[in-house]
Each structure stands twice: as C-alpha cells, then as structure tokens.
Image (cartoon, rainbow, N blue to C red):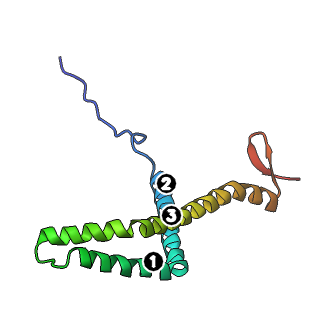
Amino acid sequence: MTTPHVQLRPNVLAHPSPTTGRFLLLIGTLLSIGLLAGNLIHNVVLAGPWTAALRTCAGTADAAVPDRSDAVDIVAHNDVLTDCLAPSERTRALFSLGGAGVVLVLGLAVVALVPWVLRRRYRLHRRWGCLCWRS
C-alpha cells in the first residue's frame, strides 16, 4: 500500500501583505521626520541656552575630573557631564516628541478627511454597499 503523493502549497495568508509592511514603513518614516523636525525647532529656538548649559557643564566636568588619562577617569568625566546636561537634554527630547506628535495628529487628520473630500469632490454616495456616482 503506497501513500498518495501530496504536493504541499505555501499558505499565502500566513505572512502579512506587502502593503502592510509598506504602510508601517511609511508611518515609521513620518514619525522619524517628526522627531527630526522637533529637534530642528529646538535647535532654532533654544540654541543659546543649550549651548550655555553645555559650556557650563563641560567646565564643571573638567573641574571635577581634571586628568582623563585612563578609562575610569573618562567614564567619570562623562557621568558628570551627562548628569549636568540631563535637564537640557530632557527639554530637547520633549521638543522631538512634540514634533512627532504633531506629525501624527496631522497624519490622522489626513486619513480622516481624505475620504470625505473625495466623496464630495466626485459627488459619490453610498448605494447598495458601494460608492457610486450621483445621478
């Protein structure tokens, strides 16, 4: 008794469609652009105070660890510098997140309004479950 030959076929529904991946890539790109825009706005608006804080913190770190000859001293210098710059960096991060949030809200507004605009522009209405021309 022989077993019948079964040809296996790939399950095409097992993987997400390429459209989903492209849409997720588009969302990631838009949010990255929002982060960049927020960072650029921070650099324009608060460049002076951030630079002053950097100079102050660099002086404080240099005074705290004057000799940076080995790795332990370099790490200690970096710790002092990052602790001192933390409030300024939090502000910069909030600007970046704000930019991403603005881009997200604008993207959601476009997604919500485009169907309405297209229906109105081309005078479409729902008839029997499909979009049809108005007569």
Q: Which mark is residue 94?
A: 3
As measured in the structure, the alpha-carbon distance from the residue carrying label 1 to the one carrying label 3 is 14 Å
User: In this orientation, which residue lies closer to the viewer: 29 or 11?
Assistant: 29
Q: CA distance from mark 2 to mark 3?
A: 32 Å
Callout 1 secondary element:
helix
Of all residues shown, which one is farthest toward the top? 1
Which element type, helix, strand or loop, lies under badge 2? helix
- The circle drawn on residue 97 is none
Query: Hey, which residue is sitting farthest left in the picture?
Result: 70
Secondary element at tag 3: helix
Direction from residue 70 to residue 76 in the image, left or right: right
Give the Cα separation between the discs numbered 1 and 2.
Answer: 42 Å
Q: Could you tell me the amino acid type at mark 3? A: Leu
Q: Position of residue 27 (x, y in %)?
A: 51, 59
Q: Which residue is mark 1?
A: 50
Q: Which residue is found at the position 76% from the left and 55% from the top?
A: 116
Residue 93 appears at what percent x and percent y? 46, 65
Horizontal and vertical percent position of residue 37: 52, 72
Where's the N terminus, which quadrant? top left
Q: Is residue 126 left or right of residue 21?
A: right
Closer mark to the observer between disc 1 and disc 2? 1
Q: Are marks 1 and 2 in contact (CB under 8 Å)?
A: no
Q: Is residue 101 above or below residue 17?
A: below
Q: Pointer 3: residues within 10 angstroms few (<14), some, or many (20+)?
A: some
Observer-nearest residue: 95 or 123? Answer: 95
Q: Mark 2 touching mark 3, by CB under 8 A? A: no
Q: Position of residue 102 (x, y in %)?
A: 60, 63
Which residue corresponds to mark 2? 19
| Disc 2 residue type (three-letter) | Thr
Which of labels 1 and 3 is toward the front? 1
